[in-house]
Amino acid sequence: MEVTRIRALRGPNLWSRHTCIEAIVTCTDDENAIRRLPGFEARLRALFPNIGELHPIVLGQPLALAHVLENAAVALQAQAGCAVNFGHTARTVEEGVYQVAFQYSEEPVGRRALELAEQLIAAAQAGTEFDAHAAITELRDLDESERLGPSTGSIVDAAVARGIPYRRLTSGSLVQFGWGSKQRRIQAAEVDSTSGVAESIAQDKELTKQLLNAAGVPVPLGRPVSDADDGWAAAHEIGLPVVVKPQDGNQGKGVTVNITTREQLLAAYDSAAAYGEVMVEKFLPGFDFRLLVVGDKLVAAARRDPPQVIGDGRQTVRQLVDLVNQDPRRGVGHATSLTKIRLDDIAIGRLESQGLAPDSVPALGQRVVLRNNANLSTGGTATDVTDTVHPEVAARAVDAAQMVGLHICGVDMVCENVLRPLEEQHGGVVEVNAAPGLRMHISPSFGRGRAVGEAVMDTLFAHGDDGRIPVVAVTGTNGKTTTARLINHLLASSGLRTGMTNTDGVYVDGRQTDSGDCSGPKSARNVLLHPDVDAAVFEVARGGVLREGLGFDRCQVAVVTNIGSGDHLGLNYITTVEDLAVLKRVIVRNVAPGGYAVLNAADPNVAAMAATCPGSVIFFTADRQHPVMATHRAQGKRTVYVDQDTLVAAEGSWRERIALRDVQITRNGTIGFQVDNVMASVAAAWAVGLDWDTIRSGLASFNNDAAGVPGRFNVMDYRGATVIADYGHNTDAMRALVAAVDTMPAKKRSVVISGAGDRRDCDIRDQTAILGQAFDDVILYQDAAQRGRADGEVMALLRQGLEGAQRTRTIDEIRGEFIAIDIALDRLQPGDLSLILVDQVEEALAHLAKRITAG
């Protein structure tokens, strides 16, 4: 078994709506049916008992090692705690070659699971060892290091529950929610509306105390100190006992509490000084409470207790710590709900203050404290007390957060309890925290967790707002670029700032931000990142979907113009029109439940996609009597069709009419494929919710020139002759172009054409076979990139297609696109027509413009 071409599909794809790893797997004869491998399955199960059920027959075919690979990759991740359950293995047209796809939650984990699954199968084949426990542990550790921490993860989970899209912007905790102009961002538990000034204030403990005191929030007395002697002097000014801590610190680092002697203060000063400036403040007796304020509300509260163990009269402190650390909730860092207790120098110092050492045996029931602070990051525990917080205590927490300017704030209080106001028990706020940890509230050690993630999302997005902008996805064999541009123009005409991707580039609010073929998922994601985009239109090409999936999780409108036979068939195991239809329908399968699929009713492969759409369907085709249209219309559903010289949008008994003479792109309705593009665009604009006056005016103002839609049936006048530049490059495009040209009068017709080397031989020949019946002169040229073909090979195939052509009288073979264009232009006489099928679109159009300007 050989695994090749591994891809990460980071969006909805051919196989699933899940993110997937896809691999091409080649199996030899024996590996193509594991029943030919004696004892293989028994050895496999001995090595990895949790692999699950292996069916003897898969899709009517014998079980191959490729199927086992898929099963193992999923099972290994699942055993490591990853939320994955999808896998699929498909045979290709090549004997013994399979496409294996399986879900992943974190891409590095998925890739490593594939490698480990390979190793497992190799060990089962060879009868060697495979450490399944070590493999699962490795995947679990990798998953913990890659996935979002519990605080950020809880906010993301709340977004997913509300249908709000998110994107992780870094390997850390910077996350974007929503798209375009509706986006919001968080960094851990800090929102984008929180200012850097507020964060700076929160980090300055002394300034924070001054502000809180001014707001009437009780705070302990204290001041910054310059050295240990000054600290001891401050302690006497304030009154013992005191607390020593860094002026700018977090997670309880360098904090020492309940200091009563000079020796304790000297040691505490050194500990705090390691983190910066030091301050001394009055020690408040009582418990440590963390109150979480989100917006203007208290959403959770917890009592925090320092890491501790209880003696049993038999075991040492070290043994008791090891026993507590066996709790599966305790881990390293912030990935788990609790953190392991560390028996380090700080803990040993705290033990010494209690007359103990790590190897001491505490008495039965003796409480042994291992830290002065109660932070979870140092092994402390949390008990939820949200339901017992006195309204006045909650109000002081909100006052503290708002005085500093934090939208998410962890307010640390020290008091006997939260049942009474702070003033009655001499309690106070000792600290406020920007980007506070949320795990003590999500998964407290004791008590029930609180929905803090939901509270954060409610402050970012109002009820009912999912943070989405309208997204229109356009795919098909022909017409998708023109359709995407026209839809974009209609949206822009309504006043929306649009983002558009297509094979010509990326455009944001009318400005081109990238060039080249940008019809893939990366360009789509970049548009959705842009804060100035109110609506997006994406041309979706087959290549991007195969390489990486879609660049979005779902769209409001999916437009499928048509499915043709000349669209790269034979590449990447897409060998038939039916295969191509399955790939193109990915956008239809990922329409939002309240969205629409706009489908060509006259194309049976496209019309059949309606059954897979989670939303509604708008069918379009010129013939309103087409059976698909008639049925859909009879059901009162939306259709767009042509009635004589008028475009009609119909729903039930309602009709909206647009005269085709007012839509210049159709040349009074004579250009059939442009009429199709207009119908699809009108249906998409209707689905988005544009008003009809905007649609009508937008159609009238859309220019099909080289500037507006480069290389898409750009009609020009040259010395009284008609010149048409088009990027048509498959047989369906040739038929549509011939039909369009036939409506235009001409004395003599010529065509300039090359061929793409990455098409099948028959597709290249068929293009000129079609053109040979419609044009008097044919000029063949060899373009710069032959795409894997030998020199002259494409030209020979093009000429073969012209054999037996009934109309063509002359055939020329030219080296170079621009030379071919010049020859065609030089031969033109008034009243002639020349169709120039350009390859280098921008350069060829610029060359044509220069020639036409020069006359």
Image (cartoon, helix red, strand yellow):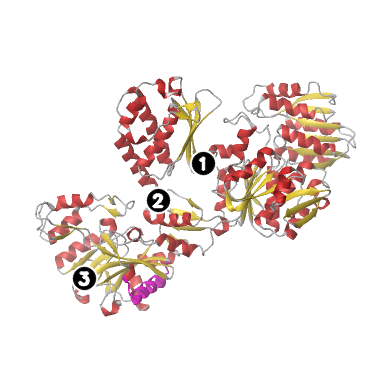
Rendered residue at 24%/68% (across/down): 287
Q: For the stretch drawn in magenta, what is the main secondary structure?
A: helix
Q: Amino acid at mark 2?
A: Leu
Of tags 1 and 3, the one toward the viewer is: 1
Quadrant for residue 721, please give it.
top right
Q: Is residue 397 magenta?
A: yes
230 relative to 49 in the view: left or right: left
Image coords of residue 155 (percent x, y): 43, 57
Considering the numbered disc 3 on the image, is that residue within a helix, a strand or a loop? strand
Image coords of residue 771 (percent x, y): 79, 29
Q: Amino acid at mark 3?
A: Val
For label 1, the residue is 16
Rendered residue at 22%/76% (across/down): 238
Q: Could you tell which of marks 3 and 2 lies nearer the N-terminus?
A: 2
Q: Is residue 400 magenta?
A: yes
Considering the numbered disc 2 on the image, is that residue within a helix, a strand or a loop? loop
Q: Amino acid at mark 1?
A: Ser
Q: Is residue 827 above or below residue 669?
A: above
For label 2, the residue is 148
Q: Is residue 121 above or below residue 722?
A: above
* Residue 211 makes an appearance in the image: no
For the N terminus, the image quarter is: top left
Task: Return the mark for residue 242.
Answer: 3
Of tags 3 and 2, the one toward the viewer is: 2
